[in-house]
């Protein structure tokens, strides 16, 4: 009977140790994942700022007045005269 109680005690002790190691490992993994989450959130925020800046830059480059100015200065385009305009029908 005494041997059975000793075996049960060893089994319970092993179960407690395994459980404690599991808790420590789980907390460690949780902290590692939290650090990764924080890093990814910071990266997301930086990308959102950059995206907003790029949208503003695109809006500036696509402004009709600027496109007209570039077409006239760099490409030598001019507004056609009324007699040069032809209507094409399908």
Image (spheres, helix red, strand yellow):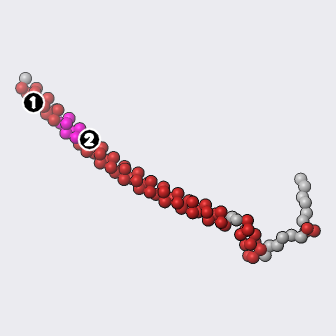
| Residue 65 or residue 85, whichever sits in front | 65
Query: Residue 72's x, y, as percent?
Result: 77, 74
Magenta portion: prevailing SS class: helix
Q: Does residue 78 lie above or below 45 as drawn?
A: below
* 65 vs 44: above or below: below
- Whether the magenta-drawn stretch holds residue 45 is answered as no
Residue 32 picture location, percent across and down: 34, 51
Identify the residue shown where x is 86% and y is 70%: 80
The quadrant of the picture occupied by the N terminus is top left
Q: Residues within 10 Å of mark 1 (few under 14, many from 20)?
A: few
Task: Point out the tag, 2 or 1, that comes first from the N-terminus.
Answer: 1
Residue 87 falls in which quadrant of the image? Answer: bottom right
Give the Cα separation between the discs numbered 2 and 1: 24 Å
The percent coordinates of residue 76 (x first, y second) are 78, 76
The residue that disc 1 covers is 6
User: Foreground: 88 or 7?
Assistant: 88
The range drawn in magenta is 14-20
Residue 22's mark?
2
Tell me residue 62's x, y (percent).
Answer: 69, 64
Q: Quadrant of residue 40?
A: bottom left
Residue 76 horizontal side relative to residue 13, left or right? right
Indicate whether residue 18 is drawn in magenta. Answer: yes
* Marks 2 & 1, CB-CB < 8 Å contact: no
Q: Secondary structure at mark 2?
A: helix
Left or right of 1 on screen, residue 86? right
What residue is rendered at 46% in x and 57% in y?
43
**SS of the residue at dot 1?**
helix
Task: From the image, state whether disc 2 or disc 1 is nearer to you.
Answer: 2
């Amino acid at each position: 009977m005494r041997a059975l109680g000793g075996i049960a005690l060893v089994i319970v002790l092993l179960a407690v140790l395994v459980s404690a190691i599991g808790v420590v490992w789980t907390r460690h993994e949780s902290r590692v994942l939290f650090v990764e989450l924080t890093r990814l959130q910071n990266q997301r925020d930086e990308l959102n700022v950059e995206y907003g800046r790029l949208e503003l830059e695109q809006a500036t480059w696509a402004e009709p007045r600027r496109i007209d100015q570039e077409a006239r200065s760099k490409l030598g385009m001019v507004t056609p005269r009324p007699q040069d305009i032809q209507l094409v029908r399908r």
